[in-house]
């Protein structure tokens, strides 16, 4: 029996269950990227886990080679809260409005959110007087959701949970999930649950990171233990076929550093299949994401990026510049470990999330503080680790860029921005 905190090798593809998988990319092992620690635990040894990508040569799916126990990742100091990002909150608000109109939701509808976090997404549907239910394994954020009036099951979504929901609430008109399905090892188990909760007229909407964006922009830091899958459209199309489901539309969206919104219905459902589906599958083929050697080139590009970033950081430090960072997202742990950045390089990290303030970054033990520290300590350089929100961060902290120091955006090419 595996213990909490342990990990195991994934020996088959999550999408097609083939064992024809090959190692494609290797990054520096890290501790769980969201496991920020208090000062009293700084002397404890933090376990690190392999961080590798595997490639399925049968369906072209890309997945993490090793899986850390989900209880350790999501029920042990899990501190991501959707509502702390104004950009993401606005994205979810717009999504609620768009999908309500597109699939004709009414006050008689029922919506389930898989990986509902603090209930931010569902709150916008509740404002429309639509019945909602969230499912999320993180105890602290589930409690926040329930306290805010969003009915939330604190559990991992699977077939058994779906059967319970169906018995207590019936099937859903919309099942939605935002950046959660890529976190779940038993992906087919999730779709088993979705299948149970979908009627002939239901729609399942899954937003996940898009590996084509990761590949094009060298966003390797989105590879971390919570993300066990790195999705493209071609394998997803195959995933839904055995369930009598079909993808009827796919949209490329901005949040989380490039994502896709995948819309699914029963086969020959009420919606016409949009051209976007085949267009993106063809684009993936053009970029070679159906070939193992393409990912080997990607690994080489990442190591060249590491060299450029380290040289720039060394140059800044040798010239006497003080350096801090903005944002403590999970991906910052991957970047810090693979680029070998620690407390000697970065004095502190500021973050808007109060659950992270007063703690120290995983493994590297850089202190996380309130954003007011930018103006109290006045660092010369501010590395934007939450680079997917760089524009909004620089706009919000224009006073820093105008009067104090310079922003440094690490991806996809390290650059200084005033």
Image: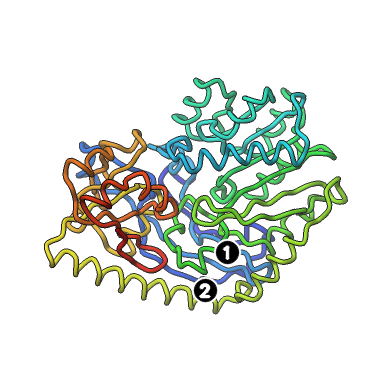
- Can you tell which quarter of the image residue 76 is in? top left
| Res. 295 mark | 2
Q: Nearer the viewer, residue 230 or 328?
A: 328
In the rendering, which numbered label is found on residue 62? 1
Determine crowd level at label 2: few under 14, some 14-19, many 20+ residues with C-alpha closer than 10 A: many
Q: Is residue 42 above or below residue 319?
A: above
Q: Which residue is drawn at 33% across and 66% down?
A: 415
Left or right: residue 81 versus residue 21 is left
Give how far across and how far down residue 95 sits, in percent.
63, 41
Q: Distance between the residues labelled 2 and 1?
A: 10 Å
Q: Residue at x 52, y 50 (%)?
A: 255
Compared to residue 276, the image places residue 2 above or below, namely above
Residue farthest to the right?
268
Instruction: Mark 2 and mark 1 in contact? Answer it, CB < 8 Å.
Output: yes
**Quarter holding the C terminus?**
bottom left
Question: Which one is nearer the viewer's eye here, 132 or 41?
Answer: 132
Residue drawn at (40%, 38%) of the image: 79
Horizontal relation, residue 1 to residue 107: left or right: left
Q: Where is residue 304 in the image (x, y as percent from the top left)?
A: 36, 76
Q: Upstream in the sequence, badge 2 or badge 1? A: 1
Residue 368: % across, % down: 27, 42
């Amino acid at each position: 029996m595996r213990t909490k905190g342990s990990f195991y090798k994934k020996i088959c593809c999550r999408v097609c269950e083939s064992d024809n998988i090959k190692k494609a990319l290797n990054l520096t092992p890290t501790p769980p990227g969201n496991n920020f620690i208090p000062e009293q635990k700084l002397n404890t040894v933090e376990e690190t886990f392999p961080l590798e990508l595997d490639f399925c040569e049968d369906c072209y799916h890309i997945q993490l080679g090793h899986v850390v126990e989900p209880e350790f990742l999501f029920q042990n100091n899990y501190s991501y809260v959707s509502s702390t990002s104004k950009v993401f909150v606005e994205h979810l608000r717009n999504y609620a409005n768009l999908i309500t109109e597109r699939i004709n939701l009414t006050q008689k509808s029922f919506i389930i959110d898989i990986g509902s976090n603090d209930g931010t997404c569902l709150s916008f549907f509740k404002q429309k007087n639509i019945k909602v239910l969230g499912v999320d394994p993180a105890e602290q954020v589930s409690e926040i959701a329930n306290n805010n009036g969003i009915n939330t099951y604190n559990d991992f979504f699977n077939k058994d949970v779906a059967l319970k929901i169906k018995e207590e609430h019936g099937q859903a008109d919309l099942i939605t999930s935002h950046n959660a399905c890529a976190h779940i090892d038993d992906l087919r188990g999730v779709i088993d649950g979705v299948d149970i909760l979908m009627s002939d007229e239901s729609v399942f909407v899954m937003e996940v990171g898009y590996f084509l964006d990761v590949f094009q922009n060298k966003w390797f830091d989105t590879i971390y233990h919570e993300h066990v899958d790195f999705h493209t459209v071609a394998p997803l199309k195959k995933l839904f076929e055995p369930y009598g489901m079909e993808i009827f539309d796919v949209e490329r969206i901005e949040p989380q550093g490039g994502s896709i919104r995948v819309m699914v219905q029963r086969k020959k459902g009420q919606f016409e299949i949009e051209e976007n589906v085949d267009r993106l599958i063809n684009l993936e083929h053009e970029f070679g994401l159906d070939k193992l050697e393409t990912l080997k080139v990607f690994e080489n590009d990442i190591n060249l990026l590491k060299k450029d970033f380290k040289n720039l950081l060394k140059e800044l430090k040798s010239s006497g510049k003080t350096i801090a960072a903005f944002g403590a997202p999970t991906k910052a742990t991957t970047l810090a470990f693979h680029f070998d950045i620690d407390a000697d390089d970065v004095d502190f990290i500021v973050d808007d999330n109060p659950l992270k303030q007063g703690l120290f970054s995983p493994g590297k033990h850089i202190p996380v503080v309130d954003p007011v520290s930018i103006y109290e300590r006045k660092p010369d350089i501010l590395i934007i680790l939450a680079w997917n929100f760089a524009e909004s961060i620089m706009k919000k902290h224009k006073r820093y860029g105008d009067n104090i120091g310079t922003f440094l955006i690490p991806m996809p090419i390290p650059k200084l921005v005033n």
